[in-house]
Image (cartoon, helix red, strand yellow):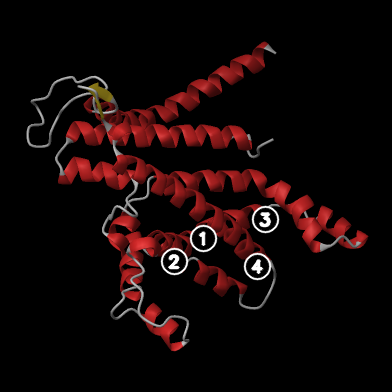
Amino acid sequence: MADRSELTRTRLRSAWLFMAPMLIALALVAGWPLLRTIWFGFTDARLSRPDAYRFVGLSNYLADVDGRWIGLLANRVWWQAAWNTAWFALVSVAIETVLGIVVALVLDAKFPGRAIVRAAVLVPWAIPTVVSAKIWLWMLNDQFGIINHILMTLHLIVVPVAWTTGTTAMWSVIMVDVWKTTPFMALLVLAALQMLPTDCYEAARVDGVHPAKVFFKVTLPLIRPALAVAVIFRALDALRIFDLVYILTSGSRDTISMSGFARLQLVDFAKTGYGSAASTLLFLVIAVVTVLVMTAGRVRLSGDAAR
C-alpha cells in the first residue's frame, strides 16, 4: 500500500511538472487579463486616459445616486442584451442538439457514400464564422438576396422581407448558427455512438424491441455523458456570441448580445471601466451556467462518463 501511495505521489509530481509550463502560460495570457478586467470594473477608467482612473466601488454595477439607480443592473440595454444572449443560447443549443443527434444517427448507419456525406456535413463547421455570416447576409438581403427570390417564386411571401432587421433578426441569427454549428454536435454524438457496445443492440433486435424504444432506453442513456459535454461546450460558445450577431445585424438593439454590449461600451463609448464591468458579469454568467449544467448533468470532465 505504501509503495502504491509513493507511486501515486510520483505520478502526481510528474503530472504537475508537465502541466506547469501550460499553467504558467495560461495564467499570463488568460488569468492576468481577467484579473485586470475585474479590477477595471471597479474603476471609472476610460479608453482616452487609461492611466488616470479612480476606484468607484460598485458604481458600474449598481448604485443609488441622488435617488436614481445607475449601473449595469439598472441599464435596460444591458438587460436586453442579457435576454437576447440567454434566448439565443437556449434556442440555438436546443435545436442543434436535436439535429445533431439526428444527423449523427444517420451518419452512423451504413450506406453507400457514407464517407463523402460525413465530409460534406462538416463543411459549414469548417467555414470561418465571418465568412459564413457574410454569405448568409447576402443571401438574406431584402433587395438581391436569393432567399427572398426563392420564397417569392414559390409564392410563400408576397414582398421581400428584411430578415436581418426587426422581429426576424434574432431568428435569422439562430438559423445561421444552427446551420454552422450542428455539424459540431453531430460529430461529438457520432463519436459517442461508435463507441457503444453492439451486444445490447443484438439482444434488443432478437427480442423484437422497437427501434424508437431502443434509442430512448439504450442509446440515449449511453451517450448522455458525451452529449452533456457537447451541450456544455456549445452553451459556453453561444453565451459569448458576438461575431455572428455583429455581422448579420450590425449589433442592433434587437439582437445585441452581452459580448456586443461590452464591446460597445469598451470601444465605441470608450468606457473602459463600465465595459469591464459588463465583461465581468458575462464571465460570471458563463461560470454559473457551466457549474449548474455540470452539476445537473453530473458531468465529470476528467472521467469518461457521467453518472
- Asked whether the viewer can see residue 193, the reply is yes
* Separation of residues labelled 1 and 3 (CA atoms): 16 Å
Q: What label does residue 124 carry, if any?
A: 2
> Residue at coordinates 38% horizontally, 29% vertically from top-left?
23
Q: Which tag, 3 or 2, sits closer to the chain's start?
A: 2
* Separation of residues labelled 1 and 2 (CA atoms): 9 Å
Q: Which tag, 1 or 3, sits closer to the chain's start?
A: 1
Name the residue carrying label 1.
182
Q: Which tag, 4 or 2, sits closer to the chain's start?
A: 4
Q: What quarter of the picture does the C terminus occupy? A: top right
Specify few, some or many for label 3: CA neighbours under 10 Å numbering under 14, 14-19, or 20 or more: many
Specify few, some or many for label 2: CA neighbours under 10 Å numbering under 14, 14-19, or 20 or more: some
* Separation of residues labelled 1 and 4 (CA atoms): 13 Å
- Of the residues tagged 1 and 3, which is closer to the observer? 1
Circles 1, 2 touching at the beta carbon (< 8 Å)? yes
- Of the residues tagged 3 and 2, which is closer to the observer? 2
* Separation of residues labelled 4 and 3 (CA atoms): 11 Å
In the depicted structure, whether residue 228 falls above or below residue 108: above
* Separation of residues labelled 4 and 2 (CA atoms): 18 Å
Q: Position of residue 180 (x, y in %)?
A: 44, 62
Name the residue carrying label 3.
193
Q: Which tag, 4 or 3, sits closer to the chain's start?
A: 4
Name the residue carrying label 4.
106
